[in-house]
């Protein structure tokens, strides 16, 4: 039976320049509301003093959606972080107990923080509701560089316990499905990320036809997303005595490595610009201004997983993609549709930028070939799959 209310839980402040989860949520909420059989929508999120004055995702202002805030202290140390997690879990679980019934589905968007809420809801007797976890990456890979081996094992054990309390688990890609099916020993449904095709089909500037060409990194400025590799490739490219002169570089986003991005912009002021975060609403226009986007999330010891929102947006606006040669990106594109570089190979990444500038015709053909791919990632099909899976028996 299809649920009559959907309760999305996300340990996020829902900022408009947030990452892939925020982008995905901002896409799926209006798509759900556009359906004649739309369930009532509730979103549980967190906020603290650092978010004051910041723009939330555009769906935040839609009166048809109920947003429930948990106010938290600002992170200062590990103890504060634990207090934040505990307060969020308890506050959201209490709200869910009062707002849900037997025809509700509680959907945690993540595996650890949100999984803790699913587990707590289960332990406190919310079994009559459908409890769902929707994986947005590979958590132990994303936090790999922040913890030692012992910490990772503890986190992985807790994550596994949390996830096994859910009635259904959904993955945002076939790679994450395979990883978590092995971890859990149970079925995980793959519903890859999707794109509002019409919104991102408005690009008017043909790719690689003007000079200088623009190469861009878009997303969270962090280790696992490959920012350091991108900056290293810029340095390597510009250090070459025969470096192509009509290539410029941009960095769009925010995150823990922001100072490195700013330093690169200062070091190469004439060739590199750090733009800061770009609002989700402004992304189509920004993508129309670039030629090439890099997708550098790591896939091995550190990194993430799933079909990348950023990758789909680049394809949807017909921009050239340079990506690590990994399952994360090759589950969407092939060699005829993008430039792939061995993961971590900085000189090869720099060489890809030079190749795109030196031989635009070949790489325009790659962009044209990618057009056939994007139709498989429509937002409408994504939402239909999700609602159909919720309605089926576990």
Image (tube, rainbow, N blue to C red):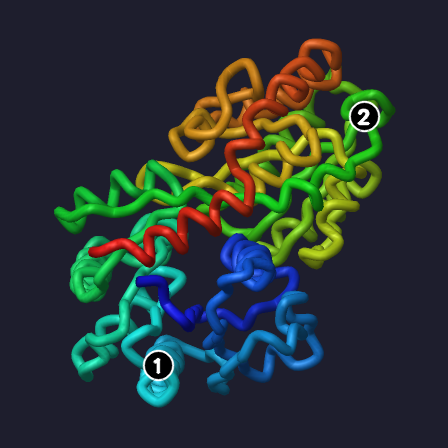
- The residue that appears at 71% across and 46% down in the rendered structure is 199
Mark 1, other Cα within 10 Å: few <14 / some 14–19 / many ≥20: some
Element type at marker 2? loop
Which numbered mark, 2 or 1, is in the foreground of this view? 1
Expressed as whole percent of the image width and height from the top left, the position of residue 359 reads: 72, 10
Residue 227 in view in this figure: no
- The residue that appears at 42% across and 29% down in the rendered structure is 331
Q: Judge by depth and name the residue closer to the eye, 304 or 185.
A: 185
Q: Is residue 256 above or below residue 205?
A: below
Q: Is residue 126 above or below residue 143?
A: below
* Residue 133 left/right relative to 338: left
Q: Which residue is mark 1?
A: 100
The answer to which quarter of the image holds residue 100 is bottom left
Residue 122 in view in this figure: yes
Expressed as whole percent of the image width and height from the top left, the position of residue 262 reads: 69, 52
- Placement of the C terminus among the 4 image quadrants: bottom left
- The residue that appears at 71% across and 79% down in the rendered structure is 53
Expressed as whole percent of the image width and height from the top left, the position of residue 271 reads: 79, 36
Q: Which residue is mark 2?
A: 206
Q: Judge by depth and name the residue closer to the eye, 117 or 292.
A: 117
Q: Judge by depth and name the residue closer to the eye, 338 or 146.
A: 338
Q: Is residue 302 above or below residue 255?
A: above
- Placement of the N terminus among the 4 image quadrants: bottom left
Element type at marker 1? loop
- The residue that appears at 57% across and 31% down in the rendered structure is 374
């Amino acid at each position: 039976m299809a649920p009559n209310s959907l309760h999305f839980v996300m340990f996020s402040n829902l900022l408009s320049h947030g990452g892939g989860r925020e982008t995905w949520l901002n896409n799926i909420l209006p798509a759900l509301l556009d359906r004649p059989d739309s369930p009532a929508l509730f979103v549980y999120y967190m906020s603290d003093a650092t978010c004051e004055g910041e723009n939330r995702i555009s769906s935040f202002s839609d009166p048809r959606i109920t947003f429930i805030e948990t106010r938290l202290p600002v992170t200062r140390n590990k103890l504060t972080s634990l207090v934040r997690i505990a307060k969020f879990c308890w506050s959201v679980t209490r709200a869910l107990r009062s707002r849900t019934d037997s025809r509700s589905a509680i959907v945690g968007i993540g595996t650890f923080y949100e999984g803790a809420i699913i587990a707590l809801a289960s332990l406190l007797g919310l079994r009559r509701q459908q409890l769902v976890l929707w994986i947005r990456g590979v958590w132990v890979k994303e936090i790999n560089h922040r913890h030692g081996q012992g910490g990772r094992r503890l986190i992985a054990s807790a994550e596994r316990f949390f996830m096994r309390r859910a009635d259904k688990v959904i993955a945002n890609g076939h790679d994450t499905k395979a990883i978590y099916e092995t971890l859990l020993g149970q079925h995980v449904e793959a519903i890859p990320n999707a794109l509002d095709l019409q919104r991102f089909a408005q690009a008017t500037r043909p790719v690689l036809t003007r000079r200088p060409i623009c190469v861009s990194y878009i997303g969270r400025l962090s280790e696992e997303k490959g920012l350091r590799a991108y900056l290293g490739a810029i340095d390597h490219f510009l250090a070459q005595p025969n470096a192509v002169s009509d290539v410029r570089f941009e960095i769009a986003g925010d995150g823990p490595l922001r100072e490195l991005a700013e330093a690169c912009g200062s070091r190469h002021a004439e060739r590199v610009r750090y733009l800061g975060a770009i609002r989700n609403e402004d992304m189509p226009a920004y993508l129309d201004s670039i030629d090439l986007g890099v997708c550098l999330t790591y896939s091995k010891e550190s990194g993430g997983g799933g079909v990348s929102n950023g990758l789909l947006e680049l394809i949807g606006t017909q921009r050239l993609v340079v990506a690590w040669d990994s399952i994360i990106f090759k589950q969407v594109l092939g060699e005829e549709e993008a430039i792939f570089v061995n993961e971590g190979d900085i000189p090869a990444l720099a060489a890809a930028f030079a190749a795109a500038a030196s031989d635009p015709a070949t790489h325009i053909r790659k962009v044209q070939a990618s057009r056939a791919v994007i139709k498989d990632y429509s937002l409408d099909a994504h939402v239909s799959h999700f609602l159909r899976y919720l309605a089926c028996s576990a």
